[in-house]
Image (cartoon, grey):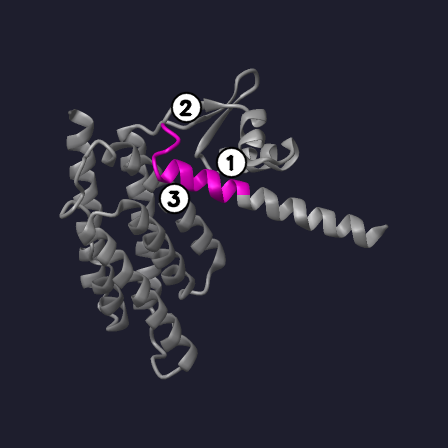
Amino acid sequence: MPASSGTGAVTRSTLRQQIADALRDEVLGGRLQPGQEFTVKEIAEQYGVSATPVREALVDLSAQGLLEADQHRGFRVHEYSLDDFRGMLEARSLVTDGMFHALDTGHKGFQEPDDPRTAAAVAGVRRRGEEAQRAAGAGDLTVLIGYDLRFWRELSTLFGNPYLADFLHRLRVQTWVCTVQHLHRLTDLRGRLWSGHTEIVDALSARDTVAARALLAAYNGHYLTLIERLAAE
């Protein structure tokens, strides 16, 4: 029946997304290591589901640059190089600089503080930033990544361009995957993780894009220096 078919399609699509999200978390958490190989069958058995949504989820993650597909051996976790990391930071900077330029030229995202919806959205972003800072201070990388991704997702959404927000989110996921591959060499991350999220919100709320750009330059410089040192070791 049509209704049954539609329900099945929705269920499969939801399962596909759940599996993709779970595997992305495994990569971000460092539990799936760079170069690690696995098959559709292995993942399907791990999650107790059929092969179809697993294959679709793995194809999705390959399209996002987190996995590599091998026709004969299945899939493997993508290994990012130091040059990849530098390129990601450059691409992120170009995107965020465009966002800040929009604010300089009159974009309403942060310029309607009396609008209850805008105020609520900015407050939500700031709360994500506070949680990210707490996680950074505690050296809890997994929690930090979760809040950092939500922080930037919600912040970029304030600029009103969903394509821009999606692109930046994808870049940030890839950057974190690359970063995690190096940071897991450190046994104690307390004091090693950047934590200036709320300062960025405050700067943008004050329409001080000069300060916001400086904070982002410090953010990128912090991790680039750290990753370059870890890669050299």
Mark 3 touching mark 2, by CB under 8 A? no
Would you say residue 194 is visible in this rendering? no
Within 10 Å of the Cα at label 2, are there few (<14), some (14-19), or many (20+) other Cα atoms?
A: few
What percent of the width, then of the height, locates residue 68? 47, 26
What percent of the width, then of the height, locates residue 108? 39, 73
Q: Quadrant of residue 186?
A: top left
**Disc nearer the start of the sequence (1/2):** 2
The amino acid type, in three-letter code, at marker 3 is: Val
The amino acid type, in three-letter code, at marker 1 is: Ala
The amino acid type, in three-letter code, at marker 2 is: Gln
Which numbered dot is residue 63? 1
Report if residue 7 lies within the magenta region: no
Would you say residue 113 is visible in this rendering? yes
Which numbered dot is residue 24? none
User: Is residue 173 positioned above or below 33 on the image?
Assistant: below
Within 10 Å of the Cα at label 1, are there few (<14), some (14-19), or many (20+) other Cα atoms?
A: few
Which numbered dot is residue 173? 3
Mark 1 touching mark 2, by CB under 8 A? no
Magenta segment, which residues? 19-33
